[in-house]
Image (spheres, helix red, strand yellow):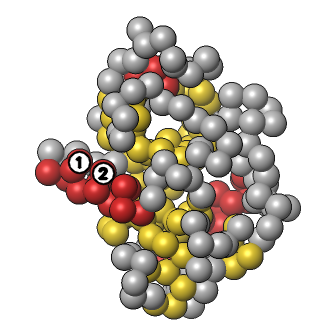
Amino acid sequence: MKKKYIIFSVIGTNADEKIEGILKRKIDDINKIGFTFWVYKSNQASPKTVQDFCKKAKTENKKVFCIFIKPSTPNGARPTKIKLSAKEFSTDNKKWKKLPKKLGPVTGAINRNVYALKFSKIEKINSSINLWDYADYLTKKSIRIRLGNSTLCAIKKNTNREVDKIRTPIRRVIAVGHLHKPFCIWVR
C-alpha cells in the first residue's frame, strides 16, 4: 500500500478479546449500520489532529486509510485490561450524542483521553509495510511508535536516511480501515 496519507495503529487485544474477534465484531457493525467506531488512546492522534489530517488529504483528492499493524515484538502492544463501554460520542468535545443503539459495544479503557476512529469498511489483509516510507504528519520526521502513542497520522516520505528512525521498519499489516466522516471522535 503506497498511499500518501495513512494512519498507523498498532493492533492488540482488548481485555479478553482477541484481534480476530475484535475485527469480526467491527465488520459486523459495518454490515449492520454502515459504520463502526474503533477506540484507541494516543497523544499523537487526537480527534482534532485526525480531522485536520483528513481534511488536508481531501483538498488533494486523496483518501485516508488506517493501517493496522502488528507490534515489532510479540509483547509490544500491551493488552487493554479494562473493558468499559462508551455511551456517548462527540465530534468537537462539546456537544455529545448517544451512541447508535444498533452499534455493537464500543469498549476499552474509556476515560478523558480516549478517542475513536470512524470506519465505513474494514478489510482483513495479510501484507507488510515499510515504516521508513512514511514520516509523522506533525513532526515531518521518522515515525516513532511507543506504548501509549501507538496510533499516529503519517505522510508518504522516505525517512531511511534519518539517524533517529524506528529500528524495525517492516511491519505485518493485519487490516485496513476506510475512514468515514467525521473520521475521529471523542467517546465517553
Closest to the observer, 81 or 118: 81
Residue shown at 45% from the left, 59% from the top: 46
Closest to the observer, 129 or 43: 43
Residue shown at 41% from the left, 44% from the top: 153
Disc 2 marks which residue?
53
Residue 73 quadrant: top right
The answer to whether marks 1 and 2 mark residues whose Cβ atoms lie closer than 8 Å is yes
Residue 101's spot in the image, x, y percent? 56, 90
Residue 121's spot in the image, x, y percent? 45, 59
Disc 1 from disc 2: Cα separation: 6 Å
Closest to the observer, 132 or 122: 132
Left or right of residue 10: residue 62 = left
Residue 141 quadrant: top left
Residue shown at 67% from the left, 72% from the top: 110
Closer mark to the observer between disc 1 and disc 2: 2
82 versus 140 height, above or below? below
Residue 121 visible = no
